[in-house]
Image (cartoon, rainbow, N blue to C red):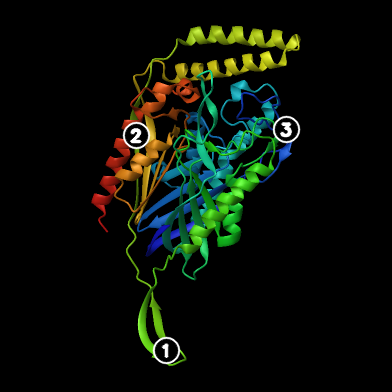
Amino acid sequence: MSHASTVSTLLAGTGRCDITPAPGTPQGGWGAQAHELGIAADMPMFVTALALSYGAERWLLIEADAIGFNPEETDRILATIVEQTGIDREKIRFSCSHTHSGPNTFRLANISAGLAMIHVYMEELPRKIAAAAWQALQRLEPVHVGAASGECFINRNRRVRTPEGEVVVGVNKDAPSDPALGVVRLDSMDGTTLASLVHYACHPTMVGWQNDRFTPDFPGPVRAVVEREVGGHCLFLQGAAGDLGPRRGFTGDLDVYKRLGRELGLAAAAIAMCIDPLREEAQFMSVMPSGANIAQYSYRSSPVAMPCRMISRRINLPIRDLPAEQELITAIAKQRDEMQRLREQGETRQMLLARARATQMGWKLENARRYGSKAVTEWPMQVLRIGPIVLVSMAGEPFSSIAQRIREASPAEYTFVSGYSNGGFGYIPDRKAYQEGGYEIEATPFAEGADDVVVQTAQSIMQEIFEEIKT
């Protein structure tokens, strides 16, 4: 484990709001799911906000238990936050944990039951998110900040080749994964912990399609453990998890996400407790005579100026050749007719396969409608520097190799790279994955080489921040 710490006039505050859906709200993150409505919540679901202030500037980091939102809904959420707080949109990071067992918040057109419930949920959600952000801003106080890094092994590479040669989603223990676990701790002046940021990359798919209870998946237990052991509010920052999943998942056994979440939470809490936000140094004072003479020390902290800045950019990612929209509409209609026929004949297995094919065509249709006429599309990226710590975030689902490349080129001592931020869906694979094929390649709207654009832009922004503030 390595660690570093800094002290400054940085101010911070936290806020939280419960966003647990009501029973009967559409649930979903699975094409294989046989039910549509969630019956109850297994754990509460939250949105947690961290407000930061340095000099005349203020920023917001907001983390929600949600699978994600399309760009239009993200715009509505961000607009509500801006209206409630007065913080400029370019200074807000809104991230999702990407839980697959929460409410269905991103493909409302596919909902046939409980539509009124999800509309009510989505109507209220932006105000609840904004309320947590507003609360955080009311609680600003001076903080000491420190960071540390370690490892945890609840994730695995999830791209598996079957004996028949198909690349599917599963558990590949032989392929590279990314066990990096990062923690940032913010302490009040009295030494109590105000907030912790826990950064880790793993798809929250421990809870599978068999389950009809709303859960935050493993990030929920992570937060609960860290808050119990360390104090304050904990924000879970999902990493670059495009090709990473849990070492055990896709299950209806709810003990699995709780157990693996506790494992990650305890690892994060141990790292957090090793951080020394005050950066205390021992100075020799005298010797106390004893059976073994004992050196006596005084302890002094070493305050360091805390540079803090965020840069938000819209980057241009290349779009691949996509099927024609009408071609996909026709194919989906045929597939739905086939689903109905199989359902009436009681061919459940074949019906599920037909529904899976229709779901896959639906992704392609969504991509064709949104990107079909474009050679490139604008994609949001943000870089926040807090002293020796850099938080890089972007929309979509970057592969773990992208995060590793960004970390290797970073001028910061600690660099934590995240996806699932500020709206939009879309895998950002690496070049190797395009040659292998598989689900992520079928689903992505991006052309080969998008990973290089992401890495080069992140490097450029990080260099700009560190050249501007050389403290």
- Which three-letter amino acid code belongs to the residue tagged 2? Val
* Front residue of this view, candidates 23 and 175: 175
Bin the neighbour count of mark 3 within 10 Å (Cα to Cα): few under 14, some 14-19, many 20 and up: some
Query: In this figure, which residue is indicated by the disc labeled 3?
Result: 24
Query: In this figure, which residue is indicated by the disc labeled 1?
Result: 293
Total numbered badges shown on the rendered structure: 3
Secondary element under disc 1, as helix, strand or loop, is loop
Left of 2 or right of it: where is 255?
right
**Res 341 quadrant in image:** top right
x and y percentages locating residue 26 in the rendered image: 67, 30
* Front residue of this view, candidates 50 and 450: 450
- Point out the tag, 2 or 1, that comes first from the N-terminus: 1
- Point out the tag, 3 or 1, that comes first from the N-terminus: 3
Contact (CB < 8 A) between labels 2 and 1?
Answer: no
Left of 66 or right of it: where is 60?
left
Contact (CB < 8 A) between labels 2 and 3?
Answer: no
- Point out the tag, 2 or 3, that comes first from the N-terminus: 3
Q: Is residue 449 visible?
A: yes
Bin the neighbour count of mark 2 within 10 Å (Cα to Cα): few under 14, some 14-19, many 20 and up: many
x and y percentages locating residue 141 in the rendered image: 46, 63
Rendered residue at 48%/38% (across/down): 79
Q: Of circles 2 and 3, which is in front?
A: 2
